[in-house]
Image: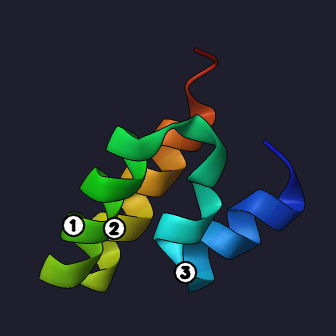
Amino acid sequence: MSFFRVLLAILFPPLSVIGKGCGSIFIVFLLTLCGWVPGVIAALIILNNPN
């Protein structure tokens, strides 16, 4: 997890998980619409997952 990805996850969560697949982008986008904090948390969890 690079510093740029973490910074991007804090500023705009859906853009930070763009390399993890379409489903991840959709989930993070929906959580970001519900609130900024859930979107950031989901993006950081997805980015921290090695798979």
Asked whether the beta carbons under mark 1 and mark 2 sit within 8 Å of each other, the answer is: yes
The answer to whether 28 is drawn above or below residue 9 in the figure is: above
Answer left or right for 29 relative to 30: right
| Of the image marks 3 and 2, the number of the one nearer the N terminus | 3
* Residue that lies at the very extreme toward the left in this rendered image: 34
| Amino acid type of the residue tagged 3 in the rendering | Phe
Mark seen at residue 16: none
For the point 43% across and 67% down, the residue is 40
| Amino acid type of the residue tagged 1 in the rendering | Leu
Secondary structure of the residue carrying tag 3 is loop
| Of the image marks 1 and 3, the number of the one nearer the N terminus | 3
Answer left or right for 33 relative to 29: left
Q: Residues within 10 Å of mark 2 (few under 14, many from 20)?
A: many
Residue 18, percent from left and from top? 60, 53
The answer to whether 6 is drawn above or below residue 22 in the figure is: below
| Of the image marks 1 and 2, the number of the one nearer the N terminus | 1
Quadrant of the snapshot with the C terminus? top right
Tell me the residue that label 1 is attached to: 31
Real-space Cα separation, disc 3 to disc 2, in angstroms: 9 Å
Answer left or right for 24 relative to 27: right
Q: Residues within 10 Å of mark 1 (few under 14, many from 20)?
A: many
Tell me the residue that label 3 is attached to: 12
Tell me the residue that label 2 is attached to: 39
Marks counted in the figure total 3
